[in-house]
Image (cartoon, rainbow, N blue to C red):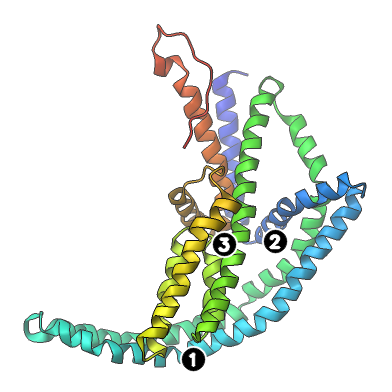
């Protein structure tokens, strides 16, 4: 098979893979979640195997422990978070009115700089006409989200299908890897293995490290905002920590929501500054301690590339696309660095008269 035929073959395989993802995206969630859990838990099973425990027993123990802890956490958090979320949506019009009243002096100040005051009056009328609609839309959206058949099926599949998929993938992980390794073209097996190890290192460093960072940030923001006295501080804090999976964007959303609630709730500047201080301290801890220690620079995934991948995945494949975005971005990043490294040592870059150099990987 010529190089051109190989490129066409791999292109067809890739196109079919994308087509399958697009057609089956509505049922892929429990399988993608199960694969992610198996990938996350595989090192624990490997350590138990090295300690003399069989793969089946180690898989059973690790999987059971993971889902038991997961269910215990959900049983404590879900009722509390749901109640606070419903209460927040019910109080949203009151918060909007409070923010509008406190913003009135600012509107009056702006009016002095606008001819006839028409612009500020239009802004005020727009807010009065639409804030209530936003609140009603949010309530209707939540009702559809909680009661929808599709979401009910997704939740059932998460608790029924995902544990089964995770167990069997985790139990047979080494055999699956060995089988796929046996399918690799022998002439390029060493290069492919090297690139796969780089992908694994990138994913392990980012996913496992970032997951820990998000959990710790969620607890910090939730406890800190609750101690400050912010209404729904636990919900805002935990959500901020989870959304921090998207660099910078997650913290910014939490900061805007938290500060909006603080302005609507408090009448003095001190508690508002304390809310801002919680976010500032959290960002300082994340940037100087958590991310450098738990994620580090070895992942070679730029924040802008991660944000683009997450948005692109969400646009193309919904929530499944979000789950697949970082792994796909890691694979693409490794392949791009490999290609650039080969290009920098080729005659295309060096010129026809220069001897080819040793292949090297271009750092991002």
Q: CA distance from mark 3 to mark 1?
A: 27 Å
Residue furthest top in the image? 353
Q: Which mark is residue 30?
A: 2
Write the residue at 54% across / 57% down. 289
Give the residue number, with chain letter if any, for mark 1: 90
Q: Quadrant of residue 290?
A: bottom right
Seen from the viewer's position, the closer of residues 139 and 279 is 279
Task: Tell me residue 207's x, y (percent).
Answer: 62, 53
Give the residue number, with chain letter if any, for mark 3: 319
Q: Which mark is residue 38?
A: none
| Mark 1 Cα shell of 10 Å, populated few (<14), some (14-19), many (≥20) | some
Mark 3 or mark 1, which is nearer to you? 1
Horizontal arrangement in the rendering, residue 294 relative to residue 236 (left or right): right
Task: Tell me residue 4's x, y (percent).
Answer: 54, 22
Q: Quadrant of residue 213?
A: bottom right
Give SS at disc 1: helix
Q: Is residue 246 visible?
A: no
Q: Is residue 190 visible?
A: yes
CB of mark 2 within 8 Å of CB of mark 1? no
Horizontal arrangement in the rendering, residue 120 relative to residue 293 (left or right): left
Give SS at disc 3: helix
**Of callouts 2 and 3, the N-terminal one:** 2
Task: Tell me residue 217's x, y (percent).
Answer: 56, 67
Q: CA distance from mark 2 to mark 1?
A: 32 Å
């Amino acid at each position: 098979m010529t190089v051109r035929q190989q490129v066409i073959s791999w292109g067809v395989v890739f196109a079919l893979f994308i087509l399958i993802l697009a057609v089956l995206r509505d049922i892929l969630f429990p399988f993608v979640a199960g694969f992610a859990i198996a990938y996350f838990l595989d090192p624990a099973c490997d350590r138990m195997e090295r300690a003399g425990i069989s793969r089946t027993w180690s898989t059973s123990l690790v999987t059971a422990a993971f889902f038991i802890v997961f269910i215990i956490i959900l049983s404590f958090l879900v009722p509390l978070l749901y109640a606070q979320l419903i209460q927040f949506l019910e109080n949203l019009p009151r918060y909007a009115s409070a923010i509008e009243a406190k913003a009135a002096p600012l509107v009056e100040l702006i009016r002095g700089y606008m001819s006839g005051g028409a612009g500020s009056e239009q802004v005020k009328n727009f807010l009065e006409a639409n804030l209530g609609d936003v609140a009603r839309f949010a309530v209707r959206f939540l009702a559809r989200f909680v009661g929808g058949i599709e979401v009910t099926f997704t939740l059932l599949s998460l608790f029924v299908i995902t544990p089964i998929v995770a167990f069997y993938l985790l139990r047979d992980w080494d055999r699956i890897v060995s089988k796929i390794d046996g399918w690799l073209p022998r002439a390029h097996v060493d290069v492919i293995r090297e690139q796969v190890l780089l992908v694994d290192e990138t994913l392990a460093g980012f996913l496992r490290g970032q997951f820990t960072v998000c959990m710790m940030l969620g607890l910090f923001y939730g406890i800190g905002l609750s101690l400050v006295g912010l209404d729904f501080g636990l919900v805002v804090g935990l959500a901020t920590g989870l959304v921090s999976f998207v660099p910078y964007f997650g913290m910014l959303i939490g900061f805007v929501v938290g500060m909006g609630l603080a302005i609507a709730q408090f009448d003095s500047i001190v508690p508002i500054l304390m809310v801002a201080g919680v976010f500032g301290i959290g960002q300082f801890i994340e940037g100087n301690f958590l991310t450098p220690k738990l994620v580090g620079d070895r992942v070679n995934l730029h924040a802008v590339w991660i944000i683009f991948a997450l948005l692109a995945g969400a646009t193309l494949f919904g929530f499944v696309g979000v789950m697949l975005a970082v792994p796909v971005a890691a694979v693409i990043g490794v392949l791009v660095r490999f290609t650039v490294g080969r290009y920098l040592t080729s005659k295309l870059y060096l010129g026809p008269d220069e001897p080819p150099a040793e292949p090297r990987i271009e750092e991002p």
